[in-house]
Image (cartoon, rainbow, N blue to C red):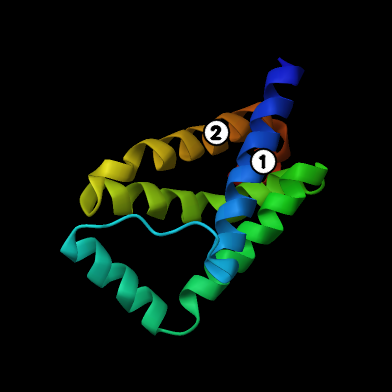
Amino acid sequence: MKKGQQIIRILLGLIVLIFGLNKFLQFMPMPPMPQAAGEFMGALVTTGYLMVVVAIVEIIAGIMLLTNRFQPLALVLLFPVLLNAFLFHLFLAPAGIAGALVASAMNIFLFFANKESYISILKIK
């Protein structure tokens, strides 16, 4: 199981690192989107900061996962990013949902594989 966890950790790290870097370097073209999805993404980019923050979180968390440093923190940082990617595709651009679903599932799997890291913050006091 440890080998499987390591493979999933590295794959998720590569995925988010590549997509984070792509937000700055634009080496992968954006696929065509339905109008509502394009307008939504345009609004996020227009803020001037939100997609930059998302990209930085993806890059930092990707590096954390690839180097196996602060893995529990990386998973917590990525959860809202991946949840929103999944919901974006679910409601606005369903054609791309597979990738978001796989990345979200990897994140959740790694949460459970590292559940001992989260037990203390989930205790009711």
Q: Nearer the viewer, residue 43 or 118?
A: 43
Q: How dense is the environment of label 2, judged by Cα within 10 Å: few (below 14), some, or many (20 and up)?
A: some
- Identify the amino acid type marked 2: Met
Identify the element where label 2 is drawn: helix
- Residue 116, how many percent across, how many down? 71, 32
Please tell me in which quadrant of the rendered image residue 84 appears.
Answer: bottom left
Residue 100 marker: none
Q: Earlier in the sequence, mark 2 or mark 1?
A: 2
- Residue 86, how many percent across, how many down? 37, 46
Q: Mark 1 highlights which residue?
A: 118
53 versus 116 height, above or below: below
- Label 2 and label 1: CA atoms lie apart by 17 Å
Residue under the point 75% across and 19% down? 2
Residue under the point 67% across and 41% down? 118
Identify the element where label 1 is drawn: loop
- Residue 52, how many percent across, how many down? 55, 74
**Name of the residue lying farthest toward the top:** 1
Please tell me in which quadrant of the rendered image residue 77 appears.
Answer: bottom right
18 versus 54 height, above or below: above
74 lies left or right of 40 = right
Q: Mark 2 highlights which residue?
A: 106
Q: Nearer the viewer, residue 95 or 3?
A: 95
